Amino acid sequence: MNKIIIFFLASILFFFTACSTQKKIAETSEKDNTTTSEDGFASEQKKIEFEYLFIEGLKQKMIGSPDNAIQYFNSCLDIMPNSAAVLYELANIHYIKNDFTSAKLLLERAIDINPENKWYKLLLAQILQNNQQYLEASKIYRELIKTEPDNINFYYLNALLLSSGGQYDEAIKAYNQLEEKTGFNEQISMARQQLYRQAGKDKEAYKEIEKLIEHDPTVPEYYGLLADMYKEDGEMNKALEYYNKVLEIEPGNGFVHFSLATFYIQNKEPEKAFTHAKQGFHNPDIEIETKIQLYLMLATAPKEQNFSDEEILELVDIISQVHPDDPRSYSIKADYFIQRNRLSEAKDYLEKALDVDPNSYPLWEQLIILDNQTGDYESMGKHSKKTMELFPTQPLPYVLNAVANIQLEAYEKALDALEAGQTYLVDNKKLEAQFELYRAEAYYNLNKRSEAFEAFEKVIEIEPDNYMAMNNYAYYLSLKGEKLDRAEMLSSEVVKANPNNPTYLDTHAWVLFKKQEFRLAKFYMETAMKNGGNESAVVVEHYGDILYNLGETEKAIKNWEKSAEMGNESKTLQQKIFEKRYIEGEE
């Protein structure tokens, strides 16, 4: 209900633009010349040199070369160390460069030399404000008020700074002084009301809004403010009375419908809350951000708000109907479906959002990740390629494109994508490890084992706890019967860190099997089976292989047959079953 009020904007803009005018420099320079000798210079030649350096400094500052300007102004100080104008210009440059400490010291010197110059004080006040030294900045404005008692900007900035500094009572007095100058002012009353609330003076805060209503009883926002305060203070009947008053004055006020929706949510009246939420969502004058905020509140804990999934979806549908040209209306609907694990529907709405605005990188990334989660690798390849074209310096789409191509058995394309994206990694070690991991997978599937194993070693060097890389590397080594000690060491580390992961347990068991440590292999394979590995046809086949080599032929055959029933179409498995003996698979 509360609205942000921009107060005296034109005057504040004037303050910033006035600070660096050429006229001020001429004035201050003229005053400074009286601080050293009759003309301020040891000789006419020094005066000419000073003026030349000063003008060159101003030129360098104007063309955006602050470092050169500093050199010229420092040379000016060598000639006239007490030139307040030069000190001010140097302070201004340091202020622009965010070196507030240097700027503050220089300005304090300038003010000591020329205490009458208000521009020096204004810049110092701005620096103090940037350093959150609000009360020190306020003192400067109080000094300026004494010299310019009709400058309302000084009164306002003084009040604002006192408020920021937590001096609420003093800030209220400052606003009272401002009101004496301006007469009745809505913004002043609003500011004062907030200060009363911050100071814990609730009666005065209520009276402030009541005065506004007396001044103009037709403004709905005033009643809304009263309603909000009553709701915050737990006086629900009073709050409802004033919310309804807003509706009497302005039945189409969308904001009050949102206020009433949250009011009824708090009071556990979901039907009334939903009715008002719908009316607010249907209002085209309410910005989409406001609607999204309410949706997010409901989406975070829908059961606590007593809204059903169907009701939340209806609100989301209204957003896309009322704001069809805003991509957020579709991305919010995608979020709704993601929250409910309806990923295919979420993808549809992310694509609609990107049809409206194809230049949103986060939406493209989210869409590609959903492609991966749903196993839609054709779309993943297409979407990641499009993202690479639109955002060529983003490294993640390249590795996602590689993942898609590996799944599609387009290994050369995967390597091409990784090579193209390598340039954009820029010290991102985690992503660099992913690049090497998928490079290893692509190389291995192209039967380039040495390149694959070299890439796996790079992954482990970059990211020593990348268990997926360690597991896959160990498994591939075991399949080829190469470096089995290295494979055992890697798979052992993986299992220690992930003792209940059936895939990792299967790999470790298989490495031990290849080393002919059959009994130990059986222990790890049975552990894998207990942790869900019995649902994997490959794990079941491996278990049969181990059993056969331990002389448990009948059990081995049963497990091979079970693996085949689970969908394992390996020709080697069929041969094992037919010949009732273990056969080394084609690697």
Image (cartoon, helix red, strand yellow):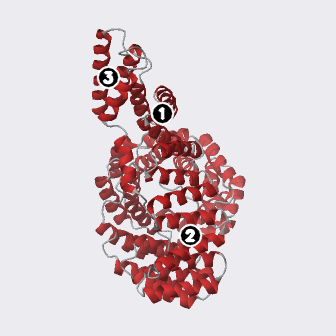
Q: Please determine whether, in this image, residue 140 is positioned above or below residue 579.
A: above
Q: Nearer the viewer, residue 540 or 428?
A: 428
* SS for dot 2: helix
Amino acid at circle 3: Phe
Circle on res. 54: 3
Q: Nearer the viewer, residue 409 or 171?
A: 171
Pointer 2 and pointer 1: residues touching (CB < 8 Å)? no
Q: Nearer the viewer, residue 280 or 373?
A: 280
Pointer 3 and pointer 2: residues touching (CB < 8 Å)? no
Q: Position of residue 181 (x, y in %)?
A: 46, 58
Whichever of callouts 2 and 1 sits on the residue coming sooner in the sequence is 1
Give the alpha-carbon distance from disc 3 to disc 1, as whole Å: 21 Å
Could you tell me which residue is drawn at 60 percent across and 70 percent down? 205
Q: Please determine whether, in this image, residue 506 is positioned above or below residue 85.
A: below
For marks 3 and 2, give the one nearer the viewer: 3
- Residue 47 lies left or right of residue 35; in this view the side is left
Location of residue 503 (image quadrant): bottom right
Give the alpha-carbon distance from disc 3 to disc 2, as whole Å: 88 Å
For marks 2 and 1, give the one nearer the viewer: 1
* SS for dot 3: helix
Q: Please determine whether, in this image, residue 24 is positioned above or below residue 413.
A: above
Could you tell me which residue is drawn at 53 percent across and 59 percent down? 175
Q: Which residue is mark 1?
A: 99
- Residue 50 lies left or right of residue 489; in this view the side is left
Q: Position of residue 385 (x, y in %)?
A: 31, 57
Whichever of callouts 3 and 2 sits on the residue coming sooner in the sequence is 3
For marks 3 and 1, give the one nearer the viewer: 3
Q: Position of residue 321 (x, y in %)?
A: 35, 81
Q: Which residue is mark 2?
A: 563
Q: Position of residue 453 (x, y in %)?
A: 48, 41
